[in-house]
């Protein structure tokens, strides 16, 4: 539930920022001056305790936001490659972190979320990437530093040792979303939204390319009812 609300807040805030709308009914309850942050996600432990995962230019912060939401408590920091861009997502009690500098995809264990530890990194088929999305036990890596930088698919059955099982490399993807074995990918440089069947992970198949090159395609999210893909 935390991830859902956190995600919606991020989308809503980004929209308002773009529209330069004055916010009147949202009251900030805390502020952490961390400097150069680049991404945020959430993790809810089995006991319901909630944590904020914050990407930073120098690594990944983990904050306890349940004990006192007005004063989040830093419970861990995992150093990483110095990078302006970092993205992170969660599978089970693992946090996966990509960056655009190098060193591969960091794998952080949140089994004890008050004492997070890095347990490894993935470097087998890429060493940097712009973004990632996780769905149904697979990590979808976007903007990796090989081939076209489209989408690489990793099987997370063994969470500490991902295995690449497929890829789609027709063009560079800046962002993507996966639901019901369907990938929505943002071809930012050609202004296209791709819809791809990924039911066969070893052979993704393009279903639709929707081009609106005058506007670009930077990011995408699909509504809960799967009726709309929201891009920007």
Image (spheres, helix red, strand yellow):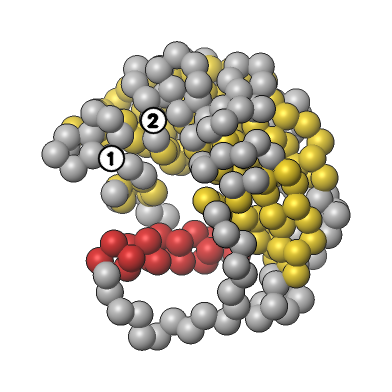
The residue singled out by tag 1 in the image is 217
Give the x, y percent position of residue 85. Answer: 51, 42
Give the x, y percent position of residue 153. Answer: 54, 25
Pointer 1: residues within 10 angstroms few (<14), some, or many (20+)? many
Whether 70 is drawn above or below 153: the answer is below
Give the x, y percent position of residue 160. Answer: 77, 31
N-term mark: 1 or 2? 2
Q: Is residue 194 left or right of residue 78?
A: left
Q: Is any part of residue 84 visible from this angle?
A: yes
The residue singled out by tag 2 in the image is 173
Query: Residue visible at 53% across and 64% down?
Result: 6
For the N terminus, the image quarter is: bottom right
Whether 206 is drawn above or below 93: the answer is above
Query: Residue visible at 65% across and 31% down?
Result: 105
Query: Residue visible at 40% across and 17% down?
Result: 148
Circles 1 and 2, Cβ within 8 Å, touching? The answer is: no
């Amino acid at each position: 539930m935390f991830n859902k609300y956190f995600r919606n807040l991020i989308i809503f805030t980004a929209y308002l920022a773009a529209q330069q709308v004055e916010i009147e009914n949202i009251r900030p309850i805390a502020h952490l001056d961390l400097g150069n942050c680049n991404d945020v996600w959430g993790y809810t432990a089995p006991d319901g305790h909630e944590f904020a995962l914050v990407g930073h230019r120098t690594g990944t912060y983990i904050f306890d936001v349940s004990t006192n939401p007005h004063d989040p408590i830093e419970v861990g920091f995992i150093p990483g490659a110095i990078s302006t861009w970092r993205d992170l997502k969660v599978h089970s009690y693992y946090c996966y972190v990509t960056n655009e500098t190098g060193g591969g995809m960091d794998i952080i264990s949140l089994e004890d979320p008050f004492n997070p530890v890095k347990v490894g990194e993935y470097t087998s088929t890429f060493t940097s990437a712009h973004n990632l999305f996780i769905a149904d036990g697979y990590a979808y890596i976007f903007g990796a530093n090989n081939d076209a930088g489209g989408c690489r698919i990793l099987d997370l059955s063994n969470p500490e040792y991902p295995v690449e099982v497929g890829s789609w490399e027709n063009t560079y993807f800046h962002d993507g979303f996966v639901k019901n074995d369907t990938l929505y990918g943002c071809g930012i440089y050609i202004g296209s939204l791709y819809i791809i069947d990924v039911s066969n992970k070893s052979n993704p198949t393009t279903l639709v390319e929707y081009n609106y090159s005058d506007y670009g395609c930077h990011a995408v999210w699909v509504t809960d009812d799967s009726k709309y893909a929201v891009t920007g």
